[in-house]
Amino acid sequence: MNRSPLRICAALVLAALAAFVLAAASGSTPIPLARLPAALAGDGPAALIVRELRLPRAFAAFVTGGLLALAGALMQVLLRNPLADPYVLGLSGGAAVGALTMLLAGLAGVWVDAGAAAGALAAVVLVFGLAHGREAWSPLRLLLTGVVTAAGWSALIALLLALAPDRALRGMVFWLLGDLSAAARLAPAALTLAFGLGAALLLAPRLNVLMHGELAAASLGVAVRPLRLALYALASLCAAAAVTVAGPVGFVGLVVPHGVRLAAGSDHRLLLPASALAGGTLLVLADTLARTAIAPQQLPLGAVTALVGVPAFLWLLNRGRHGG
């Protein structure tokens, strides 16, 4: 079915704006939509809530969702598997070990972010080094290596949780479930999203060729091995930036690219920006639900995305099987 890329992107931009408006208005202190312009422009408690709390958190959710969806779309091309997600190669496990180590040491804030980033980098280097070996790595070898190393990271996570004192355990578990309540220092993640999307769009024509198989791509002049390496580095960078901001939020990088592909086709010139927009919008809505469902308490963001993502993905699979 031929759909206008401009119309699809315009619809996604409008959906993103609507999600930001909903996020600004919703919370334990609801703000009527008619008062939002005054809250944005004026002073007082409502202005403080909207400008200092809700909109920065919505922006953090949008950046995180965009990074995860973009990383998922790239990983699905790299592994030639529509069920791949940004964490399939164990990156979230490495980030979790780094972050939980900082929390176990009694550190917080920037130290947790630094630990997550270092752990994610270690996971990326480890998987690539083991998968490459002495031979050229293949998508299957990379996937198997990632699955095995992910199991190792999971064992280390279980060990850290077992060693953690009661006072630190709740914070560690909450981080593992995804959390935007302490999101800060968003400039690096936002710049990563801008860089990642720009670089991915430059690669998009070659990704379209690669979808037909490596032999066909090579016969058409595509340098397959450097392209796969660029995909791996770019997807890992985006996923690592997302995990550093919000922890391992699941299902966004799996469901969103899959759904966009079913709705808009497989042309990566449209698929990549549409996935980033849709992923950001979805996570803004999920975070709004997490904040408001049992306000003033907050639900773990990863739990909300899983509760929404599981039925959504099953529906997408059923829709794709019936050609809908």
Image (cartoon, rainbow, N blue to C red):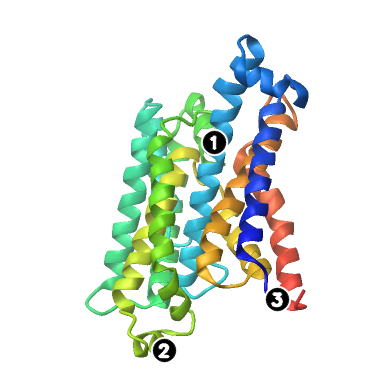
Image position, residue 185 (x, y; %):
41, 31
Question: In the image, residue 125 lies at what x, y percent?
Answer: 29, 58
Residue 285: which disc?
none
Look at mark 2 in the image and give the residue it sits on. Answer: 216
- In the image, is 236 to the left or to the right of 4? left
Badge 1 element? helix
Name which of mark 3 and mark 2 comes first in the sequence.
3
Question: Horizontal placement of 179 versus 146: left or right?
Answer: right
Of the two numbered discs 3 and 1 in the rendering, the one whose residue sits closer to the viewer:
3
> Dots 3 and 2: beta carbons under 8 Å?
no
Instruction: Specify which label sits upstream in the sequence, 3 or 1.
Output: 3
**Residue farthest to the top, as pictured:** 44
Q: In whole angstroms, how far apart are the C-alphas of marks 2 and 1?
A: 41 Å
Query: On the image, numbered disc 1 is attached to which residue?
Result: 59
Q: Amino acid at mark 2?
A: Ala
Would you say 313 lies left or right of 177 here?
right
Q: Are marks 3 and 1 in contact (CB under 8 Å)?
A: no
